[in-house]
Amino acid sequence: MQQSLGIHMSKDSGFVMDTQCPFCSVQCKMRITKELPVLGSSRPSYVIEGIANAASEGRLCVKGMNAHQHATSTERLLQPLVRKDGQLVSASWEEALSTISSRFQAIAKEYGPDSLGVYGGGSLTNESAYLLGKFARVALGTKYIDYNGRFCMSAAASAGNKTFGIDRGLTCRLSDIPLARCIILAGTNIAECQPTLMPYFTKAKENGAIIIVIDPRVTATAAIADIHLQLKPGTDAALVNGLLKVLVDEKLIDETFISRRTNGFAELKDHLSGIQLEEVADLTGLKVAAIQKAAMAYGRAETGIIFTARGVEQQTDGHVGVRNFLNLVLATGKVGKSGCGYGAVTGQGNGQGGREHGQKSDQLPGYRNIEDEQDRSYVAGVWGIDPTELPRKGVSAYEMMELVHQRVIRSLFVMGSNPIVSNPNANLVEKGLQNLDFLVVADMFLSETAKLADIVLPVTAYLENDGTLTNLEGRVLLRESTIASPGETRHDWSILCQIAEELGKKRYFSFQSAEQIFEELRLASRGGLADYYGITYDRLRREGGIYWPCTSTEEDGNQGMMFTDAFAHSDGKAIFMPVASRLPEEIPSEKYPLTMTNGRVLSHYLTGVQTRKSPSLAARNIENYIEIHPKTAQKLRVEDGEWVEVTSRRGSFNVRSRITDKIREDTVFVPMHWGGVQNVNKATSPELDPHCKMPGFKTSTVAITTLRLRK
Ligand SMILES: Nc1nc2c(c(=O)[nH]1)N[C@H]1C(S)=C(S)[C@@H](COP(=O)(O)OP(=O)(O)OC[C@H]3O[C@@H](n4cnc5c(=O)[nH]c(N)nc54)[C@H](O)[C@@H]3O)O[C@H]1N2
Ligand SMILES: Nc1nc2c(c(=O)[nH]1)N[C@H]1C(S)=C(S)[C@@H](COP(=O)(O)OP(=O)(O)OC[C@H]3O[C@@H](n4cnc5c(=O)[nH]c(N)nc54)[C@H](O)[C@@H]3O)O[C@H]1N2
Ligand code: SF4
Ligand SMILES: [Mo]
């Protein structure tokens, strides 16, 4: 067994360690110094400093500054927990692992291997994410694996794949941002969600760039906008049809680029001839003049970058919504050259790497396709199994939850996610998980999901766990630890190896370090779209970070600009797609008169399991709230700061009102960081985008009632 495993920290010691923030996709590098308690105090103190690196340039945001507080919290799980007589009680690893293997085997024997499900996360390192995919297919033999990135990156990923032939979050480098003369920020609140990137945008502005923000709310990001298109939620695709129409009419398109480097423009042009700007204005709730102004600004600018994030993507037409933004990029030829490009602003710390190496139901490492015979036999070769033993594709994250609810999936293994809070239609998901025959959760904390588990496995945190993570630029970064794991916590990857061993599959999982797994990942990804073959730990130590694709160890790791000469489709061309203008699935009715959207605040991260353990972060937002426009509040007789009940067709939750004119009158906004009665997902819709199976999180219609007036 590995030396760093199972070590109790016998006595407190100070340390200085370089690491990375565990939260968002910027992956800011930092130095942590732990100083021993001074006389009169029982607690050590921590000094956190940013370290210069290509993405954050040494900056840190408030979450990064305080991340160590959760990792060093007394609420960390330090021993396995096993449910006995209805209670979770401490148990040995031996007992936990042997129970897991015998229960998995018994359930697979009775109902078949596909009755076992695996649910991963985009916080896992590349090594753990890769191994989780292999674990599902080789150790358990199930086709059912998916992960929380389905809710995060799937619309942009599938759009990038279809339009460009490859999906890497940013097609350019962050250093291109200050060179762009026009920047469109669509459904992305960078000021709160990737705060350390803001200086790139303020620099662009200083250089004369026009910044266009597309968001139903006046966010902290909208504060830097020259043009703010405060559209109705769910109408981005329609808005872009309007922008494209203006560009074509004003001849602001790049004919040479279109003819040399793309396919399908004639169909798009034909489609646009049927678009009326007045109709677009009506659908989006914007003025024709504002749409024209934005289109002219982007069209006339010599260089430009478009960013989208979850505001555009978490829709039932998120895939085509992004594709329409990509139509804009292609029509103006603003890609593949300095100061130009498209960026899907990746969310989680390893949101990019987590989507490349096999946690997705239809995917094998290196972005390979599990239904492609060549891909199957290549990866089966690396894994030393027969291709016929490889399961076929499974279903997406929420669809897995439906199968759990229907008891088709009888047992679930969750690593790095809190699905009962983060799935849409959370009531159904919770009921499903409660009815599982056997639930295992690997986490640092007793999350809402872990509380329902039969076995909870305590894992190491970012401070203790080695591995690589791929940031939003597509740059692979190495995070190494020099400190021991607290209590009996173990690394995610090592837990997978140990369960596999119990299941008699040791020969496929005999890894002693994260680096050994990375060596196999290099081979498994070789020749795939996300090719990591040229990347090694030694190179990462020397060079700081390396962009994928990197096909040989000799290749320059610093070439971040994609598509300079060709796109990734076999003919080298990108593809236009005509996109219909439409309203969201749910439109306001008498019973549910308001459109509810949702998202994030600066101080909390996702379901808040980590950030609530950090006093400095928790104190900034101790409870959830709903943003309501003053006129709407007046109509509903809701006062500022009172508790209200928000109800949709799916369910209801309770939050405090926050009256603000920074939101549209027909729209309300709720953060996503709370579980239980404050969970917005009790009311969100599980309707999925047919192309990528992203739920339409961002638009549900709701009714609001004050709890004050209720008898
Ligand atoms: N502080 C913090 N930072 C984070 C996270 C966190 O939880 N907290 N999570 C990380 C993760 S995993 C992710 S995925 C990213 C998410 O990063 P973002 O996508 O930027 O975050 P959101 O707040 O979900 O949504 C962004 C904006 O979309 C707007 N919006 C809502 N509906 C619509 C719409 O229909 N159209 C348009 N154009 N805009 C709309 C919202 O008002 C919001 O301001 O952030 C990462 N960074
Ligand atoms: N309404 C609404 N819902 C949403 C969204 C939205 O915008 N609106 N956004 C969606 C998006 S973009 C995302 S990414 C999802 C995220 O949803 P979740 O996956 O539920 O997110 P987290 O809260 O990060 O849950 C991660 C859990 O894993 C644990 N953890 C953290 N790091 C590790 C690790 O390295 N190993 C292990 N084993 N455990 C770890 C944490 O303690 C936590 O309990 O939510 C989605 N849900
Ligand atoms: S949350 Fe994101 S921006 Fe803030 S320090 Fe961490 S990685 Fe950097
Ligand atoms: Mo995300």
Image (cartoon, rainbow, N blue to C red):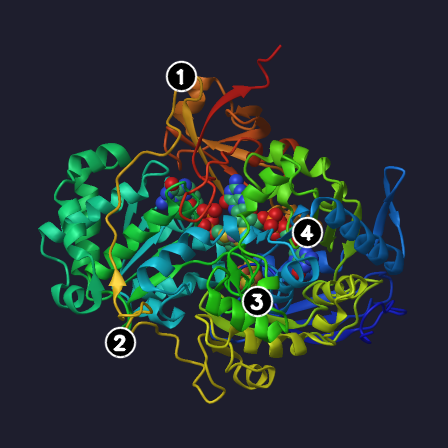
Can you tell me whether the CB of the residue at mark 2 lies under 8 Å from the nearest atom of ligand 1?
Answer: no
Q: Residues within 10 Å of mark 2 (few under 14, many from 20)?
A: few
> Which label sits on residue 103?
none
Q: Nearer the viewer, residue 664 or 695?
A: 695
Look at 59% across and 75% down and name the residue there: 382
Disc nearer the start of the sequence (3/1):
3
Q: Which residue is mark 3?
A: 387
Q: How far from the left and from the top, in percent, is residue 641?
A: 56, 28
Mark toward the start of the polypeptide (4 vs 2): 4
Q: Is residue 64 above or below residue 310?
A: below
Name the amino acid, label 4: Pro
In terms of image quadrants, where is residue 390?
Answer: bottom right
Marks 4 & 1, CB-CB < 8 Å contact: no
Q: Give, as a three-letter code, the residue at label 2.
A: Asp
* Nearer the camera: disc 4 or disc 2: 4
Which quadrant of the figure shows ligand 3? Answer: bottom right
Residue bearing the label numbered 2: 565
- The image quadrant where one finds the N terminus is bottom right
Q: Residues within 10 Å of mark 3 (few under 14, many from 20)?
A: some
Q: In what element is the residue under mark 1?
A: loop
